[in-house]
């Protein structure tokens, strides 16, 4: 920092207990894109296609999630430049709606959203490495503690998991520990890794797009998916069968509702676009770079996602048969283990395609895990500074100026989820919560416009209030549909959020008088 007066020019650095601004525009965009692109885009289109049964609705599902993401980025940017501090969305909710709502977001982020996603991406790394090294397998146990049988609690399925350490989750844990170590060594080190890996992932998606649309296009698939067939079962009058919860009850819904139900997949694949706001306190020139990173990064990834799905449709038919022996006959709907990208590559290159795709996805998972690890720890750091998380998480490494203890705590819980085998179920449960906090954060834009109308806003949300309000309505509709038809995804998520209420009061009573500055208690 440079201080100028009439007599001297002095240069000072931030205090040793504060984070250092080491993330430029390129690194910030890489953090947005790299956190978004994980394993989801290569897998979830199979489940979406089974649900919607239409090429047009498959694309529409990704477009709707894109509207939510980019619309959210435009609105979040206003909050980000108003409060460019570590913690991002936690800070926005706390300032606009009160400390309880900020804590509930941070609580859910730590318990499930961020750490569960880190665990899932780490495990995906192990899974795809197993394609290249067969000894890396979930059945190759090093230590097996227990098997938890499947239990039905109303619409919720609990259990059917194995607890222990196998070669697959051991690889996932090693990846998480290694990347945590990299990020402890400095934000510039973590950001540099992110730029390299995000570039590689963007090239991978571009390769899939060019391969599918221009090089490996299959006339049989094009005939089945495009032309008049593209719009099949997508009209206003079309009806789609939906199983309610985990039971046998089946109802029919229209195309709009089925697209809303199908958002579970693309929202998982697009989640973490807001992670760059968690590291706001370390971004150079945040008033300029934060909005640019949010909008450019999220729009670029959504564009790549939509084009990638067109590539899938150009090589594989949407409909297929689950017991078919060939990749072509299984189609997108029944790609082996839902690995649509692998099926597409196999269709073009033959069996070697599975190994090519596995290697590419390893890079993607590695980059996604790095971005998630870098960003998530900043939220717990901010919470701890407000007395709403473990006290040690508020400390900064004296040499590397990173939230080292916050990173270690995050690492420990993510590794625990890997061993527990429960991370995939937990991720299913948080889709509703993620959308709920998205709604609350958009409402925070309205709340702060009323509460602090005179506060400087170097950037104002594009399309406010119409576009911001429309995104709120869209998100509420999606959550309402999930609540009605997919209670197995919603009620557990609500329970996880509500469990945070007593913990909020425990933290507040135990730490407020000692740790909260007076201004933070208002």
Image (cartoon, helix red, strand yellow):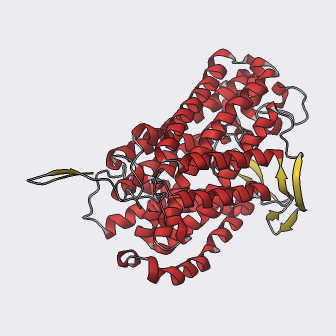
Residue positioned 57% across, 34% down in the render = 197
Q: Nearer the viewer, residue 310 or 98?
A: 98
Q: Is residue 141 left or right of residue 402?
A: right
**Residue 333, horizontal then vertical, whole percent:** 78, 37
Residue positioned 76% across, 33% down in the render = 332
- Number of numbered discs visible in the structure rendering: 0
The answer to whether residue 333 of the structure is visible from this angle is no
Q: Nearer the viewer, residue 204 or 370?
A: 370
Q: Nearer the viewer, residue 9 or 348?
A: 9
Q: Quadrant of residue 106?
A: bottom right
**Residue 222, horizontal then vertical, whole percent:** 70, 22
**Residue 144, horizontal then vertical, whole percent:** 89, 56
Q: Quadrant of residue 104?
A: bottom right
Q: Quadrant of residue 318?
A: top right
Image quarter where the C terminus lies is: bottom left
Q: Is residue 206 left or right of residue 315?
A: left
Figure check: 275 above or below 136: below
Figure check: 405 above or below 342: below
Farthest residue to the left: give it. 6
């Amino acid at each position: 920092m440079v201080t100028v007066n009439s007599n001297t020019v002095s240069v000072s650095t931030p205090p040793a207990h504060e984070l250092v601004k080491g993330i430029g525009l390129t690194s910030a965009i890489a953090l947005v894109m790299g956190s978004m692109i994980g394993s989801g885009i290569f897998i979830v289109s199979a489940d979406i296609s089974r649900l919607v049964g239409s090429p047009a609705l498959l694309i529409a599902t990704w477009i709707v999630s894109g509207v939510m993401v980019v619309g959210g980025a435009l609105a979040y940017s206003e909050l980000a430049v108003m409060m460019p501090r570590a913690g991002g969305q936690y800070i926005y909710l706390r300032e606009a709606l009160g400390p309880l709502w900020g804590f509930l977001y941070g609580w859910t982020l730590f318990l499930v959203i961020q750490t569960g996603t880190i665990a899932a991406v780490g495990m995906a790394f192990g899974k795809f490495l197993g394609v290249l090294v067969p000894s890396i397998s979930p059945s190759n146990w090093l230590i097996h503690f227990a098997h938890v049988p499947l239990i039905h609690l109303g619409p919720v399925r609990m259990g059917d998991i194995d607890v222990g350490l196998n070669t697959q989750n051991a690889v996932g844990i090693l990846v998480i520990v290694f990347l945590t170590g990299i990020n402890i060594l400095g934000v510039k080190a973590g950001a540099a890794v992110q730029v390299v890996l995000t570039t590689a992932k963007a090239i991978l998606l571009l390769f899939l797009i060019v391969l599918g649309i221009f090089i490996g296009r299959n006339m049989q698939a094009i005939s089945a998916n495009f032309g008049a067939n593209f719009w099949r079962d997508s009209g206003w009058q079309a009806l789609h069968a939906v199983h309610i919860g985990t039971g046998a009850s089946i109802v029919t819904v229209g195309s709009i509702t089925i697209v809303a139900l199908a958002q579970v997949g693309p929202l998982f694949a697009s989640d973490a676009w807001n992670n760059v706001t968690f590291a706001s306190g370390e971004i150079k020139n945040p008033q300029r770079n934060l909005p640019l990173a949010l909008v450019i990064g999220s729009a670029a990834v959504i564009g790549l996602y939509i084009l990638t799905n067109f590539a899938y449709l150009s090589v594989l038919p949407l409909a297929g048969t689950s017991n078919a022996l060939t990749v072509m006959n299984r189609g997108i709907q029944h790609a082996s283990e839902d690995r649509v990208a692998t099926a597409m590559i196999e269709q073009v290159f033959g069996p070697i395609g599975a190994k090519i795709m596995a290697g590419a996805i390893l890079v993607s998972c590695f980059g996604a895990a790095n971005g998630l690890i870098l960003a998530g720890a900043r939220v717990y750091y901010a919470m701890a500074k407000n007395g709403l998380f473990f006290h040690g998480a508020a400390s900064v490494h004296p040499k590397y100026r990173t939230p080292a203890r916050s990173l270690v705590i995050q690492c420990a819980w993510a590794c625990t989820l890997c061993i527990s085998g429960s991370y995939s179920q937990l991720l299913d449960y948080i889709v509703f919560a993620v959308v709920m906090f998205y709604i609350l954060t958009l409402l925070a834009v309205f709340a702060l416009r009323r509460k602090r109308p005179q506060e400087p806003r170097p950037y104002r949300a594009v399309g406010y209030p119409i576009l911001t309000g429309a995104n709120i309505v869209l998100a509420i509709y999606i959550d309402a549909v999930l609540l009605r038809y997919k209670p197995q995804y919603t009620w557990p998520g609500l329970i996880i959020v509500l469990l945070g209420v007593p913990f909020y009061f425990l933290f507040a009573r135990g730490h407020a008088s000692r740790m909260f500055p007076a201004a933070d208690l208002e």
